[in-house]
Image: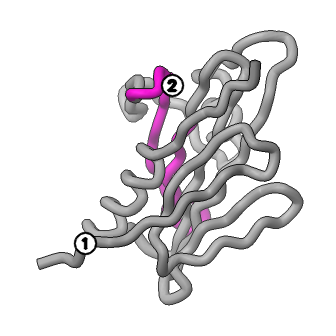
């Protein structure tokens, strides 16, 4: 039987997105990039935000670029594609690089790109997977008029 977790609200340093994360997790912002982590765990979730003043992002190109930095080839069959309730297009995948587990979610909405990358010495168990899914699912891109 799992415990019902309490979550706390987080708004990005530039006000581009918000999310929730477990109250027992910690956050540290370095150079504008927040890292969320369980102080008893082995991994961290980094959330980066970008704005394209020229227009919208092409998610396949951005994910392929991210994967190539880890010497991982973009393979269409191993990429999950969906749209969340906020209207964000999302691509997601998992891979192993340098003996570390990686999970990457890229969300785009209009001129914003949110890159969420979780990496750890070990693959997440079911409880951690549920927490990570809850965090990612809670992301809301904040549109400024």
Q: Nearer the viewer, residue 108 or 15?
A: 15
Q: Position of residue 63 (x, y in %)?
A: 61, 32
Q: As displayed, is residue 133 above or below residue 92?
A: below
> How packed is label 2: few (under 14 Cα within 10 Å), some, or many (20 or more)?
many
Q: Position of residue 130 (x, y in %)?
A: 31, 60
Q: Position of residue 44 (x, y in %)?
A: 58, 69
> How packed is label 1: few (under 14 Cα within 10 Å), some, or many (20 or more)?
few
Magenta-span inclusion, residue 105: yes
Residue labelled with disc 1: 4
Residue positioned 72% across, 50% down in the render: 12
Q: Does residue 20 appear left or right of residue 69 in this picture?
A: left
Q: Are marks 2 and 1 in contact (CB under 8 Å)?
A: no
Residue labelled with disc 2: 88
Magenta range is 85-106
Q: Position of residue 131 (x, y in %)?
A: 37, 62
Q: Does residue 141 appear left or right of residue 88 in this picture?
A: right
Report helix, strand or loop for mark 1: loop
Residue positioned 22% across, 78% down in the render: 3
Q: CA distance from mark 2 to mark 1?
A: 27 Å
Q: Does residue 85 appear left or right of residue 18 in this picture?
A: left
Q: As displayed, is residue 41 above or below residue 14?
A: below
Q: Quadrant of residue 142?
A: top right
Q: Quadrant of the C terminus?
A: top right
Magenta stretch prevailing secondary structure: strand
Magenta-span inclusion, residue 43: no
Residue positioned 42% across, 58% down in the render: 132
Residue 97 seen in render: yes
Q: Quadrant of residue 2?
A: bottom left
Report helix, strand or loop for mark 2: loop
Q: Does residue 14 appear left or right of residue 92 in this picture?
A: right
Sequence-wise, the earlier of marks 2 and 1 is: 1
């Amino acid at each position: 039987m799992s415990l019902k977790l309490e979550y706390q609200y987080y708004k990005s340093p530039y006000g581009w997105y918000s999310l929730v994360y477990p109250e027992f997790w910690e956050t540290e912002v370095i150079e504008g990039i927040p890292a969320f982590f369980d102080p008893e765990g082995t991994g961290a979730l980094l959330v980066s935000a970008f704005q394209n003043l020229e227009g919208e992002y092409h998610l396949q190109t951005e994910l392929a670029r991210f994967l190539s930095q880890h010497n991982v080839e973009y393979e269409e069959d191993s990429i999950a594609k969906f749209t969340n309730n906020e209207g964000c297009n999302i691509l997601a995948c998992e891979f192993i690089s340098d003996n570390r587990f990686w999970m990457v979610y890229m969300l785009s909405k209009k001129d914003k790109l949110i890159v969420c990358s979780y990496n750890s010495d070990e693959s997440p168990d079911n409880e951690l997977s549920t927490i990570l899914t809850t965090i990612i699912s809670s992301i809301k891109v904040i549109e400024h008029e």
